[in-house]
Image (spheres, grey):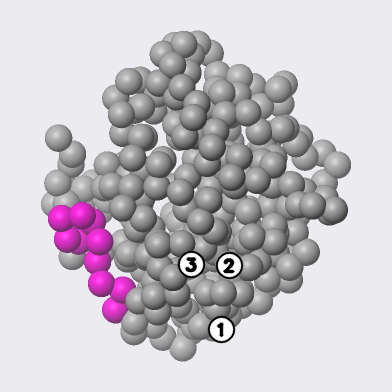
Amino acid sequence: MGVSVQEYARECAAQGLRGDYSVCRADFTVEQKYDYSAAEQEVWRTLCDRQSKLTKRLAHKSYLDGMEALSLVDRIPDFHEVSDKLRKLSGWEIVAVPGLIPAQPFFDHLANRRFPVTNWLRTREELDYIVEPDMFHDFFGHVPVLSQPAFGDFMQMYGEKAGDLIEAGGGDMITRLYWYTAEYGLMQQAGQPKKAFGAGLMSSFTELQFAVESADAHHVGFDIETVMRTTYEIDKFQRAYFVLPSFDALRDAFQHSDLAGIVKRFKDAPPLDPAMI
């Protein structure tokens, strides 16, 4: 049985998380309440202007197409307006949450093509780094590629299957798959060098440049079993970046691989060192 909203609110308050979990519905969603100050709007424009200069050069075309279609940079996005556009493109919508939410409701939202987005924005003092995922990370990072149907299909299937794989002992393994794709994924682009699409890269001024352009970045061809077995870094640049051939390949690999079999074979084995693969 999952944690209740009240229990989770108390846990978040004890950890000093800034979201207001006391107003969550049973599915951990809240109202966006579009009442952002002029200072918050200025922070949003500053973040988007700075990061867009990089994404125009380093982001995959699918991300840039989504950004253009959804018009996310001029002002803090209205969740309902973005959802209306996103539904027409891929059948997805946005739901507001106060920050990180428990795994099970997160998976349930994904399984129903709803992406949880934090309803508050970092301060000017946090332009370069923030501990918690905020609206800029969630929107600027994640939402544009949800406009791509094949990636949207992968995310929906991930939500449908993740809970069962965690129960089978594959919690770390299924988390690594999300980390190395939705957060830190790169993808081939016809006639050009590899480009980035993962939200952790899209919302990072420094790591985006390192992951795509640095000769020290370790690029590895995508293999779903290897990804699920490879550990990752939380508070430093990744020691490996997996490069997809396409979103279709990601969706098909997830749909047709024996994920339960991979978990059964390797859940008790030591993880792979990303620097050595």
Q: Residue at x 82, y 39 (%)?
A: 216
- Is 163 rendered above or below residue 147? above
Question: What SS does tag 1 mark?
Answer: loop
Percent from the top left, x then y, of residue 267? 44, 16
Residue 27 or 39: which is nearer the viewer?
27
Q: Is residue 55 left or right of residue 101?
A: right
Q: Is residue 30 magenta?
A: yes
Percent from the top left, x then y, of residue 101? 31, 50
Tell me how many marks there are: 3
The local crowd at label 2, few if under 14, some if 14 to 19, many if 20 or more residues have their Cα within 10 Å, is: some
Question: What SS does tag 2 mark?
Answer: helix
Amino acid type at mark 2:
Gly
Residue 251 or 123: which is nearer the viewer?
251
The local crowd at label 1, few if under 14, some if 14 to 19, many if 20 or more residues have their Cα within 10 Å, is: few
Any part of residue 151 in sight: yes
Q: Where residue 74 is drawn, which disc sits there?
A: 1
Q: CA distance from mark 3 to mark 2?
A: 9 Å
Residue named by callout 3: 89
Question: What SS does tag 3 mark?
Answer: helix
* C-beta proximity under 8 Å, tags 3 and 2: yes
Earlier residue among tags 3 and 2: 2
Q: Nearer the viewer, mark 1 or mark 2?
A: 2
Report the magenta residues as a range: 24-33
Earlier residue among tags 1 and 2: 2
Residue named by callout 2: 66
Amino acid type at mark 3:
Leu
Q: Residue at x 44, y 54 (%)?
A: 132
